[in-house]
Amino acid sequence: MTKQPNIIYLFRQAFTSLPTCSPSRACLLTGEYPHSNGMIGLACGFALNDYSSHLLHTLRPQGYFCALSGIQHIATGRDAWKTIGYDVLLGETAEAERISRFGV
């Protein structure tokens, strides 16, 4: 298991420049302002300019396994979690996707 002694400090002095969920999440996950990362509004119609700036692309090379549980609202499309680069999708959204694909 990878040690993460300083990860809690990432959230101690958080700031957001837009008071809606998608731009706030995008800022937190990329470290960029909305006008820089492309997420200047809610997820319907907007997406990140560059998915490689996402935090998971920094964590994965350090040995982290990156899973998405739920919906992140920073990319559009059915397989947005794959587009962003997560290793696996967990939870209710994954169940809904399985049911719609296989009817089970």
Image (cartoon, rainbow, N blue to C red):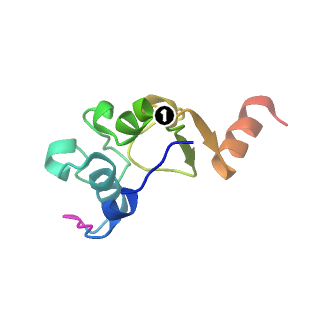
Where does the magenta region start and end? 14-18
Most extreme residue toward the left is 35
Asked whether, in this view, residue 101 is left or right of residue 57, the answer is right
Q: Quadrant of the C terminus?
A: top right
Residue where numbered disc 1 is placed: 63
Q: Quadrant of the N terminus?
A: top right
| Residue 93 part of the magenta-drawn span | no
Residue located at (50% from left, 38% from top) = 64
Q: Nearer the viewer, residue 74 or 59?
A: 59
Q: Nearer the viewer, residue 32 or 76?
A: 32
Magenta span dominant secondary structure: loop
Residue located at (48% from left, 34% from top) = 63
- Mark 1 nearby-residue class (10 Å; few <14, some 14–19, many ≥20): few
State the image quarter where residue 22 is shown.
Answer: bottom left
Vertical placement of 31 versus 87: above or below? below
State the image quarter where residue 102 is shown.
Answer: top right
Residue located at (22% from left, 52% from top) = 40
> How far from the left and from the top, in percent, is residue 74?
38, 46
